[in-house]
Amino acid sequence: MGVKQDDGSIMPTSEQEKISDELDIRVKKFLRGEKTNLEGLQDKKLKGQLAVREELFGKSAQAAAKAEKWLLPSEGGYLEAEGIEKTWRIKQESIAREIDILSARSQYDIVLPDLGPYTLDFTSSGRYMAAGGRKGHLAILDMKNMSLVKEIQVRETVRDVVFLHNELFFAAAQKKYPYIYNRDGTELHCLKEHGAVLRLQFLKNHFLLASINKSGQLRYQDVTMGGMVANYRTGLGRTDVMQVNPYNGVVALGHSLGTVSMWKPTSSTALLKRLCHKGPITAMAFHPNGHLMATAGKEKKIMLWDLRNLKDEPLQTLPGNADTLDFSQKGLLARSTSSFVQILTDSSGTQNYNNYMTHKIIKGYQVEKVLFRPYEDVLGIGHSMGWSSILIPGSGEPNFDSWVANPFETSKQRREKEVHSLLDKLPPETIMLNPTKIGTVKPQRRKEKKTKEEKEADMEAAVEAVKGIEPKKKTKGRNKPSKRTKKKQEIVANAKRPFLEQQKKEEEQVARKKQKVIEQVELPTSLQRFSRKKSAT
């Protein structure tokens, strides 16, 4: 027995069940969280609208699962060892001998010894890279054509560089203030309100530029309108460890006391403070799904935390130090210290990371930053003598969605995408630890009114509670029996006052309602001239 397909062939039932199970697994990946419970909702109109929306979410998840199975052309690669061989022993030279010419172009070393150390940033499509040297060198490169777009020398310290919503604009944290430049190297803005910034991050869904300066002040600036959205003093000292969770837009800071604090622009206090290490935090990174956080401390430990359930113990503790961390699109974790780079992988899918690949740059080079290139199996390394690029098989997403990030987009497509992203811009209020709460309905609970006997019992209990309180013994002349009795009476009166005031308010509300009912009674026409008229205001 089987099922007849469109081309006339018959598919066996077992194979059909296997495909159906596979599609069910893929559908769960594209669903937007758990289904909303609408049973307790009283508003029928709202209940119907939310039910239609949930049905559309299910249909879109099924369509995305089918498209991923049947239409996506590429599959992610990986590094496979034979026999007793270990993947972490395979060198970049061995990989270069086995790959095609186009992939071999992604292996290179740029040596600029007088301008480093370098920090890097990629656009969301992975086509363009921004490089910033500590001695003032800024460069924009086209990674598809392997060509230099523009380079400038600002002649002062550059601590960090980050792209804005596309490759046309980028921000650089310089000696005194952060600056915004366009693709041609023209200075557009000087953000003096931010001060001497150590780290920059851009929230692409909210068009917010976040910065942390030497004084420990966290600032959010809207790059569309130019206004300062928030300015908060963290109160936890100076830090240069800053990352944005791609899942919810929350900014995380790593502090010198081993604490990780998470912030949003609409709250002057931290959303969450977590003691992760016994010493200062040196690096931090978030998994692309936003549920896994990696932190590194001075005590030479790397810890992985599940942000959905922050327990006292981390998911995994790895030995070793890390000056910089980064997750790839496929979940590989890169860490680096001194001139050594290590890549860890979760091969079993149980969030248990093991050694996958290692790479040593020239001895004496100090790594400043490691960053995976999106949609490519490439790891960028910024170090004290320039920057390098190595191949990490299986790190990048093999298929790209042109509506999200298109490495081959034209100028017309880029303009249309910019307009759509501005129309879909999210307000700062949508940033929260659990974004799935947006759109949910909290059922209203009616307050049960207490009876007269219950109110009297509460008042008597409050009076009995204060009767047992002994007044303080005061100096001679102020501790007479009459004064002590008067003091006890005042204490009892103060305990009764809230209940009596509440009772008075309720009586006034009842009287007001009765007065309204009396006024609304329509008198006969012959008697309306005798009714009390309201005074004109």
Image (cartoon, rainbow, N blue to C red):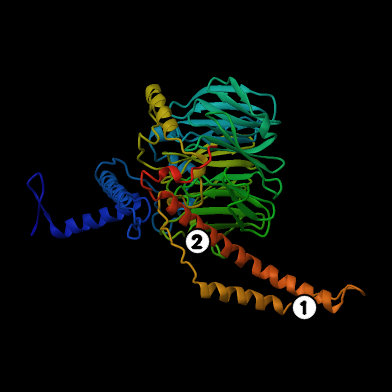
Q: Amino acid at mark 1?
A: Glu
Indicate which disc residue 309 carries.
2
In this picture, residue 466 sits left or right of residue 390: right
Judged from the image, the secondary structure of the residue bearing numbered disc 1 is loop
Query: Which of the 4 image quadrants contains residue 484?
Result: bottom right
Q: Residues within 10 Å of mark 2 (few under 14, many from 20)?
A: few
Quadrant position of the N terminus in the picture = bottom left
Indicate which disc residue 154 carries.
none
Pick the residue in front: 521 or 384: 521
Work out whether residue 339 can be spotted: no
**Tag 1–tag 2 contact (CB < 8 Å):** no
User: Residue 320: x, y in percent?
Assistant: 60, 56
Pick the residue in front: 312 or 205: 205
Pick the residue in front: 412 or 80: 412
Q: Extreme right residue here? A: 476
Please, is residue 510 above or below residue 152 in the view?
Answer: below
Judged from the image, the secondary structure of the residue bearing numbered disc 2 is loop
Q: Residues within 10 Å of mark 1 (few under 14, many from 20)?
A: few
Pick the residue in front: 184 or 502: 502
Q: Residue at x 38, y 27 (%)?
A: 409
Earlier residue among tags 1 and 2: 2
User: Residue 278: x, y in percent?
Assistant: 67, 60
Q: How many marks?
A: 2
Please, is residue 424 above or below residue 302 in the view?
Answer: above
Q: Amino acid at mark 2?
A: Asn
Work out whether residue 93 can be spotted: yes
According to the image, label 1 marks what residue? 470
User: Residue 127: x, y in percent?
Assistant: 45, 31
Q: Residue at x 66, y 78 (%)?
A: 464
Q: CA distance from mark 1 to mark 2?
A: 48 Å
Q: Residue at x 54, y 36 (%)?
A: 208
